[in-house]
Amino acid sequence: MSDPLEELRTTIRSAAEALRDGSPDSVAPTLERPPKPELGDYSTNAAMLLAPARGRPAREIAERLRDELGARLGPSAERIEIAGPGFVNIFLADRWHRDSVVSLLGAGEDFGRVSPARPERVLVEFVSANPTGPLTVASGRGAAFGDSLARLLELTGSRIEREYLLNDVGGQVRRFAESIAARMQGREPPEDGYRGEYVAELAGELAGEGADPADLEDLAHRGTEAMQERIEATLERFGVRFDTWFSERSLHEAGKIEAAIEELRERGHVYESEGAVWLRTSELGDDKDRVLLRSDGEPTYFAADIAYHRDKLERGTERMIDPLGADHHGYVPRMRAAIEALGHDPDLYEAPIMQLVRLVEGGERARMSKRKGEFALLDELTDDIGVDATRFFMLQRSHDTALDLDLDLARSQSQDNPVYYVQYAHARIASILRKAVAEGSLEAAAGKADAVDGARLASAAVDEAALTAPAEPTERALVKRLLDFPGEAARAAQRRAPHRMAAFATATAADFHAFYRDCQVVGAGEGVEPARLAICMAAKRVIARTLGLLGVSAPERM
RNA sequence: GCGCCCGUAGCUCAGUUGGAUAGAGCGUCGGUCUACGAAACCGAAGGUCACAGGUUCGAAUCCUGUCGGGCGCGCCA
């Protein structure tokens, strides 16, 4: 087995099962790290879980569990203790730590990867900002979140599609075209139009191409296309790529909106009132019913969005995740209702709500409104503090917490940005490995110092002297941290919480820095040096992959 | 008024399908470069986990209520 922790978990489970004595309840014991190193390498609450069913004190069960575990673990366990209300604390041998690093390196890119026989097909639709203006910082948060979540789900066994819905028809687009036309004719855009400077620039460009300010349809077409290009370029630079750019207009043109309404009607969820066509969402958990077709016969955005999600399902999507801005959270109940009305389980539609990004500048909060034309652009932010820092910043905090981003701080203290802390650890390891190559204790792939290959190191570390070398406390702590990677990634994916990986990256870097302080690597002596080189290699890989899940680079040098 | 989210160190925030003495970064104070990167490390100070009840061996975490903040409540998207 390539995951030492999974192996340990299995051992605990089987020991607990052996103590069940016919009691019907099976147990799911925890395997966790005790709060203090003196309490052992790992601990389990299995005895406390078994106690109620067995009608015996937890500590008594714990003693029997200790014996069962001891027999199963053999020399891997140094000793096993019972503490507190019935925790069973396991102290693992140095040899177990050494062996674990070898398995980690041997697993390569598969370490942490889950490969189910039949992966769930998940469509992550994110950003989907209207193509009526450049991407704002708020969209950037959605982009960072959606992309990182997609990466996490890919790692943990889902088949992912990234999709961007282009709202290229409707009232906002019409107002956008009107605003361009106004600028082309030297007028101010209408009150409810787009007043940003980019509209004037765009008007100038379109005038240069000979566009006709009276032809609003043409302006809408050219305008949204230009904006889409700009959005794509911004996202590309931000490290986000979509598999599909889905045009809302295509739904209209293919008659899919009528088809969706027709299906809802057949299922008995549609009625007419006041000249409009309504969906009875209030019977499916929404506050009130919603309009599908306005009294003028035009479909609402909601109707188009139902058709869109129906289309996703028809394409074979098994789960839909739509990170939404906080200002759209009221939309979720009606979409769930619509999916249920279409005969599907509403739980396969998830809408993580992205709370606001507030930019703080000069001690004041600047709110962003695309329509007023005063907004902070994602491109501007990445110009200031870089893509890595922007992504790391945005993913450091839970998506459901409002994010205060202090521009002054981000600018003036970009050196102290937490992303550098993690990247520095990676670069430091790379530097150690380069040195090891230079001194001949490590063979580099293809003769390039930066391309040290873990597989070679793994084979070097299988040497018996390296496996039995005693391990320092900080060395053992770092190894255990690295072994947490699969579990952390799985939890982050399951909880839809990429920010957990940012925390994990920081913790791993801190553990590495502590290891570095205590443990000489190059020149540490026979047995110890290859063992520590193996740890460095493993740490480098885990940090790089964790940063990769966040979309942040892992530099060899800084 | 109703709904969703939030309230944890001076500041910004982790930790929430119940676990042991509640953590990190920044800021403050004091230390550490004659070994592989000091963008680092070590130590100190700093907390009624908004408040009040409840559930139990055990609550920041679950339940109820109160207070405070954000967002939403269109035949807009």
Image: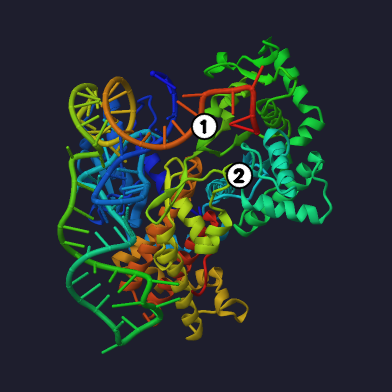
Q: On residue A329, which mark appears? A: 1
Left or right: A547 in relation to A33:
right
The residue that disc 2 covers is A127
x and y, in percent, of residue A462 in the image? 47, 69
Secondary element under disc 2, as helix, strand or loop, is: loop
3D distance between C-alphas at marks 2 and 1: 15 Å
Amino acid beneath label 2: Val
Of the numbered discs in the image, which one, if any, rests on residue A52?
none
Q: For the residue carrying disc 2, how many other residues have a C-alpha within 10 Å: few (<14), some (14-19), or many (20+)?
A: many
Q: Residue pushed farthest front? A: A186
Specify the amino acid type for callout 1. His
**A257 vs B39: above or below:** above
Residue that appears at 43% across and 64% down? A422
Label 2 close to label 1 by CB (< 8 Å): no
Which circle's residue, 2 or 1, is located before the other in the chain? 2
The image shows residue A456 at horizontal and vertical percentages of 55, 72
| Residue lying at 38% horizontally and 26% vertically, measured from the top left | A25
- Residue A268 lies, in percent from the top left, at 68, 11
